[in-house]
Amino acid sequence: MQSVVPLVRESAGVRTHSQAILPMVQELLREAGVKLADCDAIAFGAGPGSFTGVRTACGVAQGLAFGADLPTLPLVTLEAMAEACRTRTGASEVLTVLDARMGEVYWAQYRFSGGLDGGGSTGGWEIVAEPVLSAPDAVAPLPPADGALLAACGNGFAAYAEAFAGKPFAQGADATILPHARELAVLGVAALAAGRAVAADEAQPIYLRNKVAYTSAERQAINAAKAGAA
């Protein structure tokens, strides 16, 4: 079967993105020559990621899905990064590390089990290590299967370069890879075929952090602890 080539649009920044998302959707539908109601489902990056970003993604997806009577496909951003890494490098074992700010990272480990390229397979990515939030020095990937090489990607490696310095799994990490709609579209095809679509009112963001900001007292305590450890 011929590979699927997604049509994409992109914008920089959460504020710009929230304003531009609906016009971009309309442009893509015109380019593809379809109406929203002709689609099978609405896929979106449910997280983990910035609090505002994942809420915006979920809200827009729900609105589009409700309006066109479509199901939604909440997808994991870290898995989309693994797919981007595979596309770029051919890797089948991938560690993804995304900067979570506040001195922490979101990370997960995936293994590619085939499919996806045919546009409709239920194959794809297996979870080796579930997505978690941790300090950079707590990232601990598992050994890859059958002697395969573990590829690493994500801006967490650039944001916390000192923490990852000297760690074998971080060598050669591609810090330019971020979650992108291009890979979410590819993953969405497999997710839909696997029956993972949910009703719009059941779509939820994926939050791995309970707090998105520290109080002044907490920031002072954190700074004092860092100063004491220096």
Image (cartoon, grey):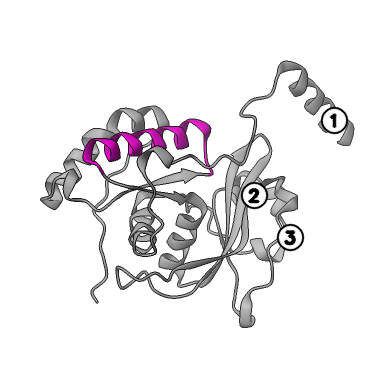
Q: Position of residue 165 (x, y in %)?
A: 71, 55
The answer to the question of whether label 1 and label 2 lie on touching residues, with beta carbons closer than 8 A, is: no
The residue positioned farthest toward the bottom in the image shown: 146
Q: Is residue 54 magenta?
A: yes
* Start-end of magenta stretch: 48-69
Which disc, if any, is residue 166? Answer: 3
Q: Is residue 29 above or below residue 222?
A: below
| Location of mark 2 (residue) | 132
Residue at (43, 75) in percent of width and height: 114
Q: Is residue 163 above or below residue 100?
A: below
**Badge 1 amino acid:** Ala
For the stretch drawn in magenta, what is the main secondary structure? Answer: helix
Q: Is residue 169 above or below residue 62?
A: below
- 65 with respect to 229 (left or right): left
Report how far apart the C-alphas of labels 3 and 1 lie in the structure.
Answer: 25 Å
Which disc, if any, is residue 225? Answer: 1
Residue at (52, 53) in percent of width and height: 78
Q: Position of residue 228 (x, y in %)?
A: 89, 31
The answer to which quarter of the image holds residue 61 is top left
Front of the two marks 3 and 1? 1
Q: Secondary structure at mark 2?
A: strand
Q: Point out the image quarter for the C terminus.
A: top right
Chain-order first, disc 1 or disc 2 = 2
